[in-house]
Image (cartoon, helix red, strand yellow):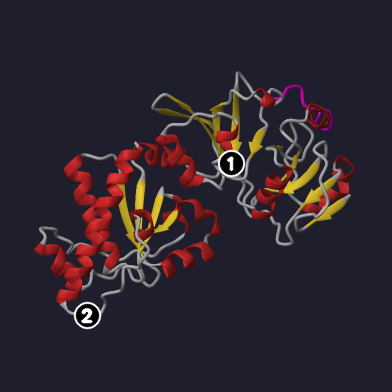
Amino acid sequence: MKIYNELSKHKIEKSAIFLHYTGSMFGIGCSAFNKEAIAKINFLKNRKDKSGYIALIPDIDWLKRFDVQITPEIHRILQQYLPGELSVILEVPDPRFQYISQNGKVAFRIPTNKLLREFIKNLDQPIISTSVNISGGNPIQNLDEILARFKSWFDLAILPDDAKVDNNKPSTIIEFSGDIINLIRDGSIPFSEIELSYQLPQILFVCTGNTCRSPIAGYLAKRIITKEDLKFRVASAGFVAEGMPISENSDRVLALNGIDASGHKSTLLNEENLRKSWLVLTMTLKHKNKILQLYPASASKVYTLSEYAGFNNDVADPIGKDIEYYKNTFEEINEKVKIIFEKIKEER
């Protein structure tokens, strides 16, 4: 069995059965469109039916290939949690999924591992993913054990050098029914969090210390949401420290515009508040790039404030400047936040 830890220059046969690493777990897979390969996996695992197979795709736009129709609300959930440990059951009219679909529906997920996503792109077909085990047994997540017991199952393996299992929890599986989300399988992401994100998507504003620019953006966004009765939440965060008060001049400039920000305390950016946010808007390109460096799986939802509003400049740091500079910063952020919410309303 050939093990690839980078993309192969050789064409991979679409009938191949392979060991792969999703970013959190090892799995067995093949093309989701190959009847013979799927039947062989069923035989190897002693599976009696085709239920439970998850289709892995490299990005959300692939759903358009298969004429999958999703609402803006569902798209936000996909954008928020994928790539990640969430599988979403969707109606799929494309007949090529007939070997894994159940009542015309398929569970889709985007794996966090970049190598696997690139492999799927090169294969140019979605793949199935299922645990390495005999049906009814515990999933095997030790690579040495997998190779010792099941090596003969695989034609090849796609495994990054740093593949390891830190979390034995499977992906959370959900299904949409009208305006309701149904939990199909509990897993890595709390279902209560997903429900809240579906009903009230969160927008996260980020700057360096979360004491000047991002609080201004956050409070302005909250005012628009309250005034227009929009179904969104707002948070802000930074890279420096937890629990710091808003800067004096940011507090003053907000107060001059009828906003009380005296209760603000800075929040540190982390994996959890990123995961809980549908849209992440940074004040500068440097902030955006730092997030993508630390949390590359968040790429589909991180933009600079200016970028999302249709501009190409950073919102400069006013720290240490006089009140007039802060007033100009306020006006710049206010203009862009208004544009962003007009854009969001058009997408609903």
Residue at 31% x, 72% y: name it: 316
Q: Is residue 23 above or below residue 191?
A: below
Residue beneath label 1, please? Answer: 171
**Which three-letter amino acid code belongs to the residue tagged 1?**
Ser
Q: Between marks 2 and 1, how big is the CA–CA gap?
A: 48 Å
Q: Earlier in the sequence, mark 2 or mark 1?
A: 1
Circle 2: is it few (<14), some (14-19), or many (20+) Cα within 10 Å? few
Specify whether 40 is left or right of 189: right
Image spot of residue 180 (x, y percent): 41, 27
Residue at 50% x, 46% y: name it: 81
Between circles 2 and 1, the one closer to the viewer is 2
Residue beneath label 2, please? Answer: 321
Total of numbered circles in the picture?
2
**Which three-letter amino acid code belongs to the residue tagged 2?**
Lys
Q: In the figure, residue 36 lies in which quadrant?
A: top right
Q: Is residue 169 at least partly visible in the picture?
A: yes
Specify whether 16 is left or right of 333: right
Which stretch is magenta?
Answer: 43-50
